């Protein structure tokens, strides 16, 4: 319809509607030589906000480092004491040393392995359980009370019990990690199942889908975004639980490393351990988000 | 595959006899639809129209197999409806496309459920998408489509399995007026090509007249059939017919039927002052008498 209207306008002889467009093109179309520049300029204009956020972010980080540097350099003591706090330079030197130290790398590796095993077990149990609980009322009514009683107990509170339950330290720490991530994953999956649009179920039924197909083709993909929310939250809690467990009962791991550094008066290593834990947690979350983007391509516009 | 076999053309007779449906509440059962009988002949386009809450969607959902009648029978080609099936394709007002499937995967869904292999599915889906003018969107996800496009996908998705009857529940209710008119035209074109029986629920009088061979007008709750109106307008129909005297006469007739029921449905909320602007002639009676 629009096309017809345009053609009508064009066919009117001598109307200004024709003359104006014919005069414009040379100005609107840039010369080939300038095209590259123009594109770069446009890219900049389109990403102005992101670039600004990036610049501000970098500035804020630099300011943080500067404050840290000044506070430790002048050993500021205003109620809180920076006397023993390592300076950024000391931490950086410590990092350089640690990066070549197999013992430190082993700590990091062991922590990552514990997270991976605990988190993987939690995912393989919590996601199917949440899906089944969401689909079958009887299962939900049966499992939910137990999960509600156990859920508010922080994973750290399980440390003594866990040491009693499991034959070795390694298993008890993995169990703590598992517990930390289990409930967020379970609850989010269950929540996702209750949020499935009933119209989609009816649409699938009208197209001849039976129970198993509806579960696979509708319930599961509809719940996936919630599952991934659960995985992200669960991963965060898993790290919290792991570090606590390692500090209390470990002999290896980055949490143990951090605590040991305090006992051995190697203050630079405390900060190194902390930063390392932060970076690992961030990396794990980014990994899950990346995976979510691959598994759920429909979320992107 | 899209063109149904000649045998299929003769199928799709829907018969609803002495249908009633009530919900249980604390105060006892509440009747939503009461003693209603309708039929859709093979290849016929039938609309149900009525004020909101009259139970027209309830009736449609019973034909789809989502609701069981309290009394009466729902048959398609002589077989009692026992539950939802691909025999009765449904189009919902809320589009109800699967957001995690591309446009083509959505259209293929019913065929996939039938166990038809991938390449055949793809060919049929492409043909239908072509008919609906959506071929270039086949690999997009529904979120990136406009409302009218989504509903076109919804319609061809329901048609892909070659259902005996197509059920539409206010499918154009959330579209803007212009898109609506175009969609009505597209639906009639497709229906004329495929000759599937259609049961169409709407509260839009123009839409019902423009699309249908026959229109059932329902009363306010508990819903029952108030009138059955044949639409003798010739086909193919064009938008320009909406201004013909024949169309306008039908419109006037249906409008007065509906208005009565709408007023009843609104109950005590309506008073004489509110009615003044509506140009309703009370013929000297009080409002209570009319309602």
Image (cartoon, rainbow, N blue to C red):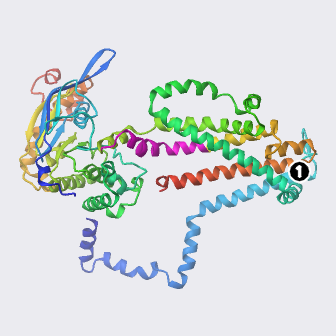
- Residue drawn at (60%, 60%), measured in percent from left and top? A49
Residue toward you, B198 or B146: B198
Q: Position of residue B233 (x, y in %)?
A: 7, 50
Residue toward you, B11 or A86: B11
Q: Which residue is mark 1?
A: A268
Q: Which quadrant would the N terminus of chain A be assigned to in this image?
A: bottom left
Is residue B58 shown above or below A20? above
Query: Badge 1 sits on which subunit?
Result: A
- Residue drawn at (41%, 80%), measured in percent from left and top? A25
Outermost residue on the front side: it is A167
Is residue A229 a member of the stretch shown in magenta? yes
One can see residue B59 in this view: yes
Is residue B68 a member of the stretch shown in magenta? no
Residue toward you, A49 or B156: B156
- Residue drawn at (28%, 77%), measured in percent from left and top? A15
Q: How many marks?
A: 1
User: Mostly what secondary structure, the magenta segment?
Assistant: helix
Which residues lie in the magenta part?
Answer: A208-231
Q: Is residue A269 left or right of residue A37?
A: right
Mark 1 Cα shell of 10 Å, populated few (<14), some (14-19), many (≥20): many
Q: Is residue A25 left or right of residue A115?
A: left
One can see residue A71 in this view: no
Residue toward you, A217 or A202: A217
Q: Position of residue B221 (x, y in %)?
A: 22, 26
Is residue A70 shown above or below A25? above
Q: Position of residue A202 (x, y in %)?
A: 33, 39
Image quarter of residue B199: top left
């Amino acid at each position: 319809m629009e096309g017809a209207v345009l053609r009508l306008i064009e066919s009117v002889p001598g109307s200004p509607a024709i003359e104006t467009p014919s005069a414009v093109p040379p100005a609107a179309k840039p010369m080939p030589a300038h095209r590259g520049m123009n594109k770069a300029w446009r890219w900049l204009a389109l990403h102005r906000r992101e670039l600004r956020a990036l610049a501000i972010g970098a500035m804020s980080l630099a300011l943080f480092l500067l404050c840290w540097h000044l506070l430790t350099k002048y050993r500021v003591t205003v109620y809180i004491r920076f006397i023993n706090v390592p300076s950024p330079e000391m931490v950086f030197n410590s990092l350089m040393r640690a990066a070549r130290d197999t013992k430190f790398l082993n700590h990091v590796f062991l922590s990552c392995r514990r997270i991976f095993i605990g988190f993987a077990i939690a995912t393989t149990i919590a996601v199917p359980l949440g899906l089944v609980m969401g689909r079958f009322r009887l299962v939900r009514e049966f499992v939910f009370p137990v999960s509600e009683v156990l859920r508010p107990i922080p994973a750290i509170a399980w440390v003594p019990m866990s040491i009693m339950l499991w034959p070795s330290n390694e298993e008890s720490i993995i169990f703590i990690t598992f517990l930390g991530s289990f409930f967020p994953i379970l609850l989010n999956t269950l929540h996702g199942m209750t949020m499935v649009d009933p119209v989609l179920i009816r649409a699938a039924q009208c197209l001849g889908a039976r129970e198993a197909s509806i579960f696979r083709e509708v319930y599961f993909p509809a719940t996936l975004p919630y599952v991934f929310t659960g995985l992200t939250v669960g991963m965060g809690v898993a790290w919290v639980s792991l570090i606590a467990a390692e500090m209390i009962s470990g002999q290896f791991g980055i949490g143990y490393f951090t605590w040991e550094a305090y006992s051995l008066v190697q203050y630079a290593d405390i900060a190194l351990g902390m930063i390392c834990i932060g970076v690992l947690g961030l990396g794990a979350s980014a990994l899950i988000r990346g995976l979510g983007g691959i598994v759920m391509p429909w979320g992107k516009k | 595959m899209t063109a149904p076999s000649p045998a299929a053309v003769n199928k799709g007779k829907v018969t609803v006899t002495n249908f009633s449906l009530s919900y249980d509440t604390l105060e006892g059962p509440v009747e939503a639809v009461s003693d209603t009988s309708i039929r859709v002949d093979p290849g016929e386009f039938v609309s149900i129209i009525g004020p909101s809450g009259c139970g027209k969607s309830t009736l449609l959902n019973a034909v789809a197999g989502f609701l069981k009648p309290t009394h009466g029978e729902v048959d398609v080609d002589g077989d009692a409806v026992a539950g939802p099936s691909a025999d009765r394709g449904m189009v919902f007002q809320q589009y109800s496309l699967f957001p995690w499937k591309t446009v083509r995967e959505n259209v293929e869904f019913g065929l996939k459920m039938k166990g038809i292999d991938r390449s055949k599915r793809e060919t049929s889906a492409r043909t239908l998408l072509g008919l609906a003018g959506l071929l270039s969107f086949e690999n997009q996800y529904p979120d990136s489509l406009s409302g009218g496009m989504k509903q076109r996908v919804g319609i061809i998705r329901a048609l892909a399995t070659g259902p005996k009857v197509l059920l539409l529940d206010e499918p154009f209710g959330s579209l803007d007026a212009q898109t609506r008119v175009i969609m009505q035209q597209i639906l009639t074109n497709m229906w004329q090509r495929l000759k599937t029986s259609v049961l169409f629920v709407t509260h839009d009088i123009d839409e019902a007249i423009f699309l249908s061979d026959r229109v059932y007008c329902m009363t306010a709750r508990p819903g029952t059939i108030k009138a059955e109106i044949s639409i003798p307008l010739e086909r193919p129909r064009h938008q320009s017919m909406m201004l013909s005297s024949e169309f306008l006469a039908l419109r006037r007739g249906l409008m007065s039927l509906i208005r009565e029921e709408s007023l009843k449905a609104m109950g005590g909320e309506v008073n004489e002052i509110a009615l003044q602007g509506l140009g309703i002639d009370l013929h000297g009676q009080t409002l209570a008498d009319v309602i």
